[in-house]
Image (cartoon, rainbow, N blue to C red):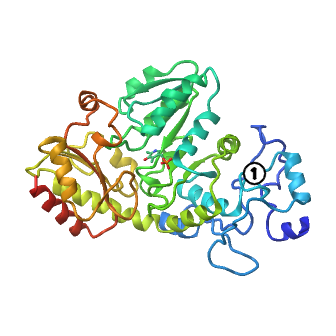
Amino acid sequence: MSEQDRTAVGFRAGLEDDAQWLNDLKRRRNPGPRSVHHRAVDPSLGAATVAVHGGTYEDPVTGAVGTPVFQTSTFLLDDLSYSAFERGATRDVPIYTRYGNPSQWSVQEKAAALEGAESALVTSSGMSAIASTIYALTNNGSHIVTAYDVYGGTYNLMREDMPSAGREVTFVDSTDLAAVEAAIRPETQLLFFESLTNPLLKAPQLRAIADIAKRHDALLVVDNTFLSPVNLRPLDLGADVVVHSATKYLNGHSDVTAGVVAGSRKFVDRVWAQALRFGGTTEPLACYLLERGLKTLALRMRAHNDNAERLAAFLDGHEKVLAVHHPSLDHYPHQHLREDVLGGYGGMVAFEVAGGDDAALKFCSALRIPYLATSLGGVESLVSLPFNTSHCSLTTAQRASIGIRPGLVRYSAGVERAEDLVADVARALETI
Ligand SMILES: *Cc1c(COP(=O)(O)O)cnc(C)c1O
């Protein structure tokens, strides 16, 4: 295939400016990467429209309505490839799938459009997205501020790997603005928080934290897994980079492991370069599944939002339930979230049943609809107990000190009929 052939089918985008070297942070950058056949959508369109159409590869040869699966590890070398090597623009031309592949670009364009970002990167897992981002955006000798209750994998990375890589980490309560600001040092480069925490659904004030980050010349990275861009767009609130475990809501069917990073092309290029070295490539076939899942994101989130709200309303005040954690409830402590969200609060609801962890185990085994499994964000409801899963390495007292009291149940509401989920929970509560 000649350069003219590939140019004719649209693989020129990204080389049109005077791109010099990738690591020249001042060079002008185009959004993407994308070819002219990756569908660009008007960012003012609603999330439901963007989710369906953003990034679809419109195949000029066959006219296929969906993105083909570009199941290949490598691409023909031609003058375009050599010129990309020479100009440090290898992110913009399909050369080798670890560097980029049109199937990845489709997912990336869709995710970027949903998050309101210039560029996105799809990775092999949420942890791959998080690790690549943190390493790429910090240097040896720097300092990071994060929450003591971040996702377990992130916590371990921050605690185990960052210090040995020359990054010091301070863990704070992300909902305590004064504590966040007090933790900042002259060498702080990165603040890393989750838009909604696991399992207690605490919401940091992202707007105010973004201001703090800017004032101290640090970057704010937000893990938006629990809310999804249908419910909250951290970049709009001032965050610099958003990361996701796409394994959860973005894919939505509990059948793919993947991650997403979204932000300005400048930052995502740096994360891409790091991800290249770590090797967290997403298989084209996984991209196909993820793109298919993403098309219904807005539709699914409506059902997740509704179902969790209905469950929270039913559980709140139930005689066998001691506490319910959900942002829709009047006693929810982080009311600012109501102003930040676009749709709802996602499908998670956490509650404490009377009788402690034994009663919680009994309750879970009496449920007939959800599967007893970790993870979240799938169309099927899932239920798990923090005490014997995510937080089993803590003592009962340590768990209590971070608000995880005996009997706490974490329920990930799927997209089933709300009445069925509520009736199932009601019946299971009667068994304890
Ligand atoms: C699951 C999860 C991750 C990790 O994602 P993987 O796809 O399992 O690597 C990171 N952050 C949050 C909030 C998660 O729920």
- For residue 46, say whether it is visible: no
Element on which disc 1 rests: loop
Badge count:
1
The residue where tag 1 is placed is 91
In percent of the image, x 17 and y 44: which residue is there?
Answer: 358
Q: In x, y percent, where is residue 297?
A: 46, 64
* Disc 1 within 8 angstroms of ligand 1 (CB): no
Compared across the picture, whether 178 is left or right of 12 comes to left
The amino acid type found where label 1 is placed reads Arg
Q: In this view of the protein, can residue 375 be seen by the observer? A: yes
Q: Position of residue 400 (x, y in %)?
A: 24, 31
Q: In the figure, residue 382 lies in which quadrant?
A: bottom left
Quarter of the image where the N terminus is located: bottom right
397 left or right, relative to 163: left
Which of the 4 image quadrants contains residue 209? top left
Q: Is residue 85 depicted above or below 138 in this figure?
A: below
Q: Residue furthest top?
A: 186
Badge 1, how many Cα within 10 Å: few under 14, some, many 20+? many
Horizontal side of 85 relative to 262 (left or right) equals right
> Residue 89 or 289: which is nearer the viewer?
289
- 54 or 323, which lies in front? 323
Instruction: Say which residue appears at 53% left-offset and 70% top-offset.
Output: 52
Q: Is residue 24 above or below residue 409?
A: above
7 up-or-down from 277: above or below = below
Name the residue: 39% across, 30% down. Answer: 148
Q: Is residue 36 left or right of residue 46?
A: right
Residue 251: percent from left, percent from top:
49, 61
Q: Please provide percent x and percent y for residue 271.
A: 65, 42
